[in-house]
Structure formats: C-alpha cells, structure tokens
Image (cartoon, rainbow, N blue to C red):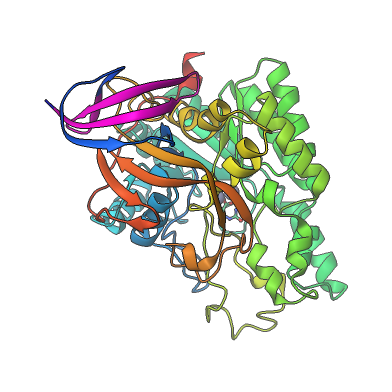
Amino acid sequence: MLDIAIRNAEIVTAGDRIHAEIGIRQGRIVSIAENVGLARQDIDAKGLLVLPGGIDAHVHLEQPQGGGVVMADGFESGTRSAAAGGNTTVMPFALQQKGQSLREAVDAYHAAAKGKCYVDTSFHLIITDPTPQVLGQELPALVKAGYTSFKVFMTYDDMVLNDRELIVVFDVARREKAMVMVHAEGYDAIKYMARRLEEAGKTAPYYHAESRPQSVEREATHRAISHAELTDVPITIVHVSGRDPMEQIQWAKKRGMNVYAETCPQYIALTADDLKGLNMDFEGAKYVCSPPPRDLDSQKAIWEGLRDGTFDIFSSDHCPFRFEDAQGKDAPGARTNFKWVPNGIPGVETRLPILFSEGVSKRRISIERFVELTATNPAKLFGLYPKKGTIAVGADADLTFWDPEREVTISQSLMHHDCDYTPYEGLAVKGWPVRTILRGETIALDGDVLGAPTDGVYLERGTSRAFSG
Ligand code: URP
Ligand code: ZN
Ligand code: ZN
C-alpha cells in the first residue's frame, strides 16, 4: 500500500505535461500511472498543476557580514519563507572569511543550520582566501565530500579575488570537477565610479546603480569567461542583469564553451528607477542589490534570454537586510549614503510567483521552461538530479501544487521571512503555489507553513552535469 496518492494531477516537468496519479512511499515517488492504487492518504489535485518543488540555487542566510551588519534571515525564517513560496530545496553559501579555514566555515554554517530548516538545503562554498592550504587540501577534500560548487567574487573589499587568484581557483575547480559561480563586476571600475559620484555629492541610494553600470558587469563577465577558457573549466555567471553581460555569455555559448548563466526576479520586475525611492530619498535602499536592476530594455533582453537558452537557471539571490535596522546608523552619512547600504534584497518567497506570473501567465515562457529554469536545471547544474528537480519514479516526492488562476497582490503581510519589507510590494501576480510537499509531507498549505524546522535534511551533492558534456 502507498503512503500517499496524488489524484487528478496535471503533472508538468521540464519535458512533459501529463494527466496522471502519483504514488508516494517513504518520501519517494514509486509510481506514476493512470491509477496508482490504494493509499493511506489521498490528496486531490483537481484544477491544480503539480510541478517539481522549486530549487532556489542562490540564497544567502545568516551569512556573516562586516561592520556589525546582520542578515535579516537565518535558516529558520529563510527556509520557512522558501517553503511558503513553493520551494523544497535551497542552496545558501558557507562563506570563508579571510584568514579562516574553509572547513571551519563549513562546520560553523552547519551548526547554524542544524534543526532549523523547513526545506532541504545544500551549501555552496564562498572562497575569499585561496591559500595553498585551501587550494591544495581543503577544497579538494570538501568537493569530494559533496560540496561540489563554490562562488568567487570579482568585487567587494573583503571578498574580491584578483585575476591570478581566479585562475588558480578555476584550475582547482577543473581538476576536482566543481562548479564555479562567478560574481562578475569589476572591482576597480566600481571604486572609481563610487568615488567620482561621492565627490559630486551624489550619495543617495539611486547612485548605487550609477556606480555599477552594465559596462562594469560586461567587462568582468568577459574576463571570467576568458579565464574559464584558459583553464578549461565550466562556470556559471550568476545574477546577470541585462543585455551587455548577456552578449558575452551568448558569445561564449556560441563558441561551444561550457558557460552557464543565472538571472533573478529583480532583473525582470525592478528597474534602477526604483532606487530613486519617493524623491531620491532613502526608500531607494530597499532595492539596492548588485548588480543593480537596470532599465526596460534590459528587462526585454532578460526575457529573450529566458526564452532562448542564454539563461540556464532562475534564482532569487535572496539576501535580506532590514530597512529599519540600526546597523551603521552612527556612521557619518548613514541612511543617506549608498555606500552604507548593504547590498541585497529579499526574494526567496516571491521568486516562483513572479516568474510564473510574468512568464507563464503572460505567455512569455512555457510552463515546461518555467520548471526547467526553477527546478530541473538547478538540480542538474549543482549535482542533485534526478533525486531532485523532476517528477519521476525514484525521485524524492518534492512537489508544488500551483493554482494558475489565483490572483494575489504581493505584500509584506503575506511574507514568512524576517525582513521588514518586500521590494515587490503591490505587484499583482496571477498563479500561486498553494501546497508545498517535501519528501511526501505537506509543509506549506494555502499560505500556512505546516512543517517543522527539523523537516529539512542536508544534501550531499554529486558532480555537476556540466562535467559530463
Ligand atoms: O546584492 C547582492 N546580490 N548581494 C548578495 C551577494 C551577492 O553578490 O550575491
Ligand atoms: Zn554575487
Ligand atoms: Zn547572491
């Protein structure tokens, strides 16, 4: 006898749309058939779409920040918010601080996550201090232990790697078969622009966007691609914001390079004008992230890329900071100067509804492509497929039921995060995740999170599909 039978399901995967029943036993899908037989529990999905649970491959939770800044979400609130938003797996970052060993960073991050996850998690690493010990011993050992991806930064004082460091890190990734995620913005160009704007008295949050124009992202994207070509390693360019960096990625893909790309909700639902706030005031800080949102032409380009395969994955880059926090308030120019605004905005709960509504409901992308971008490809790119990211016999029973007709206006009052705002306040969406099932257990239903913070398990990952051609 089955534990659960999902009846009347309109199942959508990256490749198919079928009407069938799903049989679940011990948290896994054991049958997909016209009639799966008797079960202890029946769940009726009539009128709903049944999709693989969302995999958000780019979230920041409880990540240590400099200067007394504290991230708004830890594991408990961040994964609660993820569950409510139709996700069953999130991938946050274990950040190596300068001088710290990678293993120490990973152990501390596991300790922070223990018993606090409503959904499954798996960590990427962030490498900020590529010492011989890190590159020669720690990183290879961690990749073998299932930490098969890491992020590197081409900007930020406390995280930037120079070209030589990038190249040696890429080389280790090639040898160990780890996926490198690249934050591609040029450090020196940003420094130059930020100083020029500050000298001109242009310090409102809006000028954050002017300090990091697309040319800065385009140049760094090309540089990262060149280093990847030199070292012969697959890379993923993360949080791509517009046409200019996209052209570099398209150029690489056309040459047959193993270059993958991610974009995020802020680049289809926000523009740099949002950083102007009400009248160039501090409200604009609610939209400060890097790279910054661009303009309507960039949004158009992103949609083209979501359709034509320039983009492989669509993640939130959830990186929440509280607007009303006291952090940095005593600093000179605090709450006026963009340089004091921590970079990042919340979005793990709104990622799927925004792409569903703006993409599927408005007929810009197919529902199969939606599944591919938000679940199947993240699982493939980061070594979780086919356990995660699809609906198939043998896969974990991670499912999200969608009501494609439900109309919702996004507001802070609906959110389950610990941030004090959503940058998408007032955005009307059509299509909403109404039930999230994690390994057979309903963890969110109609806006209520029913699961427990002990439900999520940690996932050791295999090698990215990028290494198998
Ligand atoms: O502004 C952003 N995106 N902050 C999060 C950190 C990162 O670079 O992904
Ligand atoms: Zn980044
Ligand atoms: Zn990020």
Whether residue 136 is situated above or below residue 443 in the rendered picture: above
Q: Residue at x 88, y 73 (%)?
A: 200
Percent of width and height locating residue 381: 48, 28
Would you say residue 212 is visible in this rendering?
yes
Q: Look at the image and say whether residue 288 sits in the magenta stretch.
A: no
Q: Which residue is painted at 67% across and 39% down in the image? A: 362
Instruction: Spot the residue most to the left.
Output: 1
Of residues 210 and 457, the one drawn nearer to the viewer in this rendering: 457
Question: Looking at the image, how many numbered discs can be counted on the residues?
Answer: 0
The main secondary structure of the magenta stretch is: strand
| Of the pair 94 and 307, the residue shown nearer to us | 307
Which region is colored magenta? 2-29
Taking 232 as reference, is 10 left or right?
Answer: left
Residue 229 position in % (x across, y down): 65, 22
The structure residue drawn at horizontal position 85% and vertical position 76%, both measured from the top left corner, is: 201
State which quarter of the image contains the N terminus: top left
* Image quadrant in which you'd find residue 176: top left
